[in-house]
Image: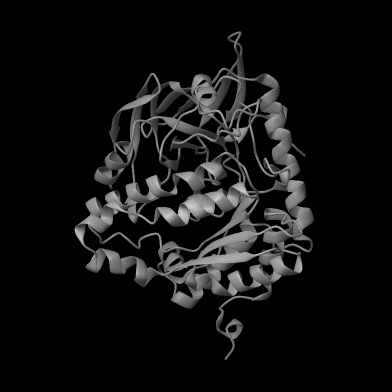
Amino acid sequence: MTEDEGLPFDPKMLDRMANVCIKFGLNLQHGQDLIITSTVESLPLVRRIVEEAYRAGAGVVTTLLSDEEISLAKYRYGNEESFDRAPEWIFKGMAEAFGNNTARLAISADNPMLLSEQDPEKVSRLGKAMSIASKPAMERITNFETNWNIVSYPGSKWAKQVFPKLSEEEAIRKLAEVIFSASRINGSDPISDLRAHHENLKKRQEWLNGYSFSSLHYTGPGTDLTIGLADGHAWKGGASMAKNGIICSPNIPTEEVFTTPHANRVDGFVKATKPLVHRGTIIEGIEVCFEKGKIVKASASKGEEVFLQLLDTDNGSRRLGEVALVPHSSPISQSGVLFYNTLYDENAACHIALGQCYSKCFIEDISSNPKAIENSGGNSSMIHVDWMIGSEELDIDGITREGEIVPIFRKGEWVEDISIP
């Protein structure tokens, strides 16, 4: 039996995904190198992407694969000091590669509950060590110095978490169907479909940029929050140009337009509308209170200890680094599926992110000037963790510098005046 014969879904969809990854998601250029990170389980897709990359004229394609049992071995047998260390040399090499125009592709298929039975303190310590070690590489990505893309593969443990009542084979098949649909690769011309969708996202961001709002005001059940926006902020969404001059689409799927909030101008309270899965822990019922940009009070009905540890990661982890708008009618939201995967769940609802800001979200290119980013209100942190606050009951108003109030969302949807055909 071949590898493809063992798949519980049409393997031709993986061919489509690989084609979209290289030609649209990454827009890989002739002679450009590529680094792919993935789980071993995703090899059927990895192999196709590597083949597609070389057909497109790639230089050197390097794959870095992770394995669930190998990851767990450290928790089972590793010594204490190993949880405060991470392989810095790998991330330094990746940072150098990204700085030299190497593209980056990540395939998400991980078991969201992989670390759920491990010691939370060890999980937190290792997570912090990895955040510190990976910062040189991640800064290259958050600064959008090279073209990059993230897509997904229907991993078996992930599928069973999403569809626990189905058999493993049925769960994988169902998750695959949802992934392919949400990624818009199941139509007759996926790349054309994606281009049309991204053009609509571009119109949204242009409308928002035209107002240059000073802040956004959110109201809904358990929420009355004012988020000040960074000075000189710019809304982004969909495909855009990286600093290396290549237009790419970082996330497939994507439904959001997003920008950088001001780290010191967030006040009020907000309640999460979907669970957050962080390092193997499901965190539910998040409620926080902000004062002058900082979370001063926080609770969760489930996973509170892990959430509080996250907030204490560093000086910037209690402040916001991203604010994103997603209508409740987005295809991912309407699927009714909770994915336990941020790439999907964040595209089902408006969300905010704790931690590091996207330095590309400014009108002027200040991404290489940390002081300028700080002076504009951009946050700095070792973490960037999105969590969902949108619902069909959320209203959002934009407030201009002159104090004018402009409706943006009503009942979880874009206001009629800016509807896109």
Name the residue at 58% across, 53% down. Answer: 97
| Corner quadrant of residue 143 | top right
Q: How many marks?
A: 0
Residue 289 image offset from top left, x and y in percent: 34, 26
The residue positioned 57% from the left and 67% from the top of the image is: 176
Q: Give residue 127's position: percent from left, percent from top.
A: 34, 50
Q: Is residue 370 above or below residue 199?
A: above
Asked if residue 218 shows in the view, the reply is yes
User: In this orientation, does residue 216 appear?
Assistant: no
The residue lying toward the viewer, choosing from 178 and 364, is 364
Q: Quadrant of residue 72?
A: bottom left
Q: Position of residue 3 (x, y in %)?
A: 57, 83
Left or right side of 241 for 396 = left
The residue positioned 35% from the left and 66% from the top of the image is: 71
**Front residue of this view, candidates 106 and 275:** 106
Answer left or right for 236 relative to 420: left
Classify 260 as above or below 146.
above
